Every structure is written in structure tokens, then in C-alpha cells.
């Protein structure tokens, strides 16, 4: 009991101030004015995809042509090296044949006689030298 003997009285609850609940407006899409607009958007998308496809296809073709050109260039270089190798091998073979003919005893004798005017001695004498006699002349 409150002071003064008066019975307690219930006070009304304070009023809540709730914001007014308005339904939120969802913007509604207006339906396309005509199906022609949807068709136009579809055609633009198709055109863009077609342009990208053609660009990528062109890029692929250019890469393929470049690769083929590089392969042809390498083949030409390889063929040139192979021709040079065959020429060097043929020259080596000719030189080997010439060296074989020049190293025969008869050819050496003929060159010595014709070019250096050397004569063959009618009597050949061989001298045998002993190792001790040749190396130790003072003993």
C-alpha cells in the first residue's frame, strides 16, 4: 500500500510507438512492350557470341599458319645441313682414295724420282748399330 492509505491503482502501460507498417513496394517489371524487344536482345547476344567465336577461330587459324611456317623453315634448314653433310662426306671419301693411292710404295718412288730428282742406288747396304755402342760411347 502506498503512503496515505489509498489503494494502488494500475497505470496504463506506456504506448508504444511502432512505426507504421507500410507494405514495401516491390518494383514490378513492366512486361516487355512487345516480343520484338526480347527477340532483339536475343539477336544482340547471338551476334556478340558469333563475333567472339569468329575472332577466336581467326586467332586459331593464324596460330596454325604460323606453326606450319615455322615447321617448313626448320625442314629447309635441316635439308641444307643434310646436303652439306653429304658434300663433306663425298669430299672425305675422295681425299681418302687419293691418300691411299699416294701412300703406295710405287707412287712414292715415282714422286721422289720425278719431283725431287732422286735416284735409286744400285747397291743397298744395311748398317746395324748396337744399342750399347750408340748410347755409351765413352765407356
Image (cartoon, rainbow, N blue to C red):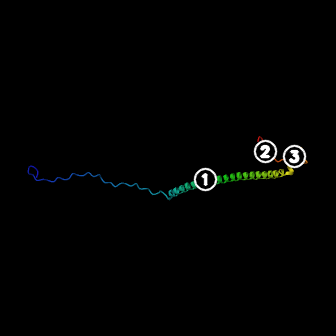
The residue under label 3 is: 112
Q: Quadrant of residue 25?
A: bottom left
- x, y percent for residue 74: 68, 52
Q: Earlier in the sequence, mark 1 or mark 2?
A: 1
Q: Is residue 90 left or right of residue 22?
A: right
| 10 Å crowding of disc 2: few (<14), some (14-19), many (20+) | few
Q: Which of these two is toward me, 42 or 50?
A: 50
**Circle 1/circle 3 CB separation < 8 Å:** no
Q: CA distance from mark 1 to mark 2?
A: 91 Å
Q: Which mark is residue 7?
A: none
Q: Earlier in the sequence, mark 3 or mark 2?
A: 3
Q: Which of these two is toward me, 3 or 96?
A: 96
Q: Which quadrant of the figure contains the C terminus?
A: top right
Q: Which mark is residue 133?
A: 2
Q: Secondary structure at mark 1?
A: helix
Q: Which mark is residue 59?
A: 1
Amino acid at each position: 500500500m502506498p503512503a496515505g492509505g489509498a489503494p494502488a491503482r494500475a497505470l496504463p502501460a506506456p504506448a508504444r510507438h511502432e512505426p507504421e507498417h507500410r507494405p514495401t513496394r516491390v518494383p514490378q517489371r513492366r512486361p516487355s512492350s512487345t516480343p520484338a524487344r526480347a527477340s532483339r536482345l536475343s539477336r544482340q547476344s547471338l551476334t556478340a557470341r558469333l563475333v567472339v567465336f569468329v575472332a577466336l577461330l581467326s586467332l586459331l587459324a593464324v596460330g596454325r599458319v604460323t606453326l606450319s611456317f615455322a615447321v617448313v623453315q626448320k625442314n629447309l634448314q635441316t635439308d641444307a645441313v643434310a646436303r652439306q653433310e653429304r658434300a663433306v662426306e663425298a669430299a672425305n671419301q675422295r681425299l681418302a682414295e687419293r691418300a691411299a693411292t699416294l701412300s703406295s710404295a710405287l707412287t712414292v718412288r715415282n714422286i721422289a724420282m720425278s719431283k725431287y730428282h732422286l735416284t735409286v742406288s744400285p747397291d743397298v747396304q744395311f748398317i746395324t748399330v748396337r744399342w750399347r755402342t750408340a748410347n755409351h760411347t765413352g765407356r
